[in-house]
Amino acid sequence: MSEEQSGFARGAAETRAATGMTGTVDAASRPDVYSDHPTTARWTHVALPCADIDASIDFYTKFTPMELLDKRTDALGHGAWLGHSDAAERPFILVLIEFFASSGQEGLGLLKPFAHLGIELPTLEAVDEIAARGEAAGCLNMAPTEMPPPVGYICALNDPDGNVIEYSYDQGVYSTAKTVWGNGG
């Protein structure tokens, strides 16, 4: 088992212990907690640890189109879900987690230099605007730059924990998805 897997499994075990849950259940006797479920397997979230949940929520609601969906606290720390309010049928959520020092989850890594979260913007001017806002806020990582296809016109900001958020225009994600998967995808 790799260090990342053992850290993930350790965190899950600590969460179960803190909430009094066991690790296994009989599916036939487990009642659903929620009434809505996907009809097929769906990619639903990316989770990032953070040092200050409120600073991270503030950053992501100021510098991305995401809105706060939920915020909660449990025995291990604070958590927040952010996403697009117009995507209730196919939600994709950024999960932010601030662990309490007592949780044993200190030292969790952040996205490495090339790893990043990407947001495609509708205009080239929107990339320039987010870069100007990021520079004014002191979190500009990379000024607007024209890159070869398929990358497009991009800039990058750092969130409060140093994770990189890339903003692009004309990256081709939407065009490629429509070409390959069609409009109903």
Image (spheres, rainbow, N blue to C red):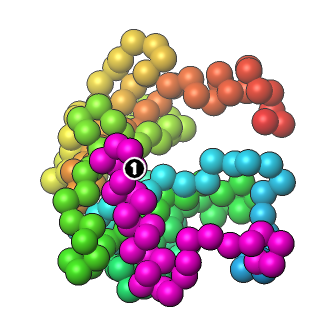
Q: Which residues are magenta?
A: 1-30
Please tell me which residue lies in front, 103 or 137.
103
Indicate yes or no whether the magenta region holds residue 17: yes
- Residue appearing at x 48%, y 86% in the figure: 19
Mark 1 — residue?
A: 5
Comparing 157 with 42, the one in front is 42
The image quarter containing residue 32 is: bottom right
Q: Quadrant of residue 151?
A: top left
Residue drawn at (78%, 36%), measured in percent from left and top? 185
Residue 125, image x, y percentages: 41, 36
Judge whether residue 34 is colored magenta. no
What quarter of the picture does the N terminus occupy? top left
Residue 61 shows in this picture: no
x and y, in percent, of residue 11 in the image = 38, 66
The three-letter amino acid code for the residue at tag 1 is: Gln
Q: Examine the rendering and report whether any part of residue 99 can be seen.
A: yes
